[in-house]
Amino acid sequence: MSKLNYEKSLIIIKPDAVQRNLIGEIITRFEKKGLKIIGLKMMNVGDALLEEHYAHIKDKPFFGGIRNFMKACPVIVMAIEGINTVSSVRLLVGPTKAWEANAGTIRGDFSLSTQSNIVHASDSIENGEIEVRRFFLEEELFEYQKIDTDFIYAEHKE
């Protein structure tokens, strides 16, 4: 299968999910969907990384609260790859305002908040590429063939 059609998405399992012991449940949902994890690590996020990641809101009055929340404990960052990954991930995660998320989505099942909404997920193909590079060094990302790829993407066979 050609990698030209593959998309990447960054997932951040936020402090509320880490504290509530939801890490395994969240990772499992992406795996069960058939998405390929190409990078996974636990890390503390510093001010510079948070300001870069949240550049679009860093001048808003609520940014300080988000920064403090994201630094409350380590987070799990995960790079996911596949065909139509960004749209698939957004469906699994649900909308940012978690109280609007449908049951069955990660946010719909585990959150009622905007800030404490369990996960971050890239919102576009372009941002997926940028965000994965922001959080992962090249040597922390892995290329490998999953044995179930032909069954997951059967209609995309070349």
Image (cartoon, helix red, strand yellow):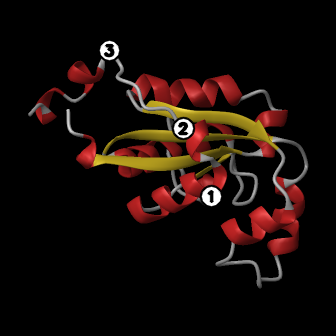
Residue 44 visible at all: yes
Q: Amino acid at mark 2?
A: Leu
Local SS, label 1: helix
The spot of residue 126 in percent (x, y) is 42, 64
Q: Amino acid at mark 1?
A: Arg
Circle 1: is it few (<14), some (14-19), or many (20+) Cα within 10 Å?
A: few
Local SS, label 2: loop
Query: As drawn, is 58 to the left or to the right of 12?
Result: right
Q: Quadrant of residue 77?
A: top right
| Residue placed most toward the observer, 28 or 40 | 40
- Identify the residue at image location x=24%, y=47%: 5
Residue ID for mark 2: 141
The spot of residue 141 in percent (x, y) is 54, 38
Circle 2: is it few (<14), some (14-19), or many (20+) Cα within 10 Å?
A: some
Residue ID for mark 1: 134
Residue ID for mark 3: 147
- Identify the residue at image location x=21%, y=21%: 150
Quarter of the rendering occupied by the N terminus? top left
- In primary-sequence order, the first of circles 1 and 2 is 1
**What is the count of numbered marks?**
3
Quarter of the rendering occupied by the C terminus? top left
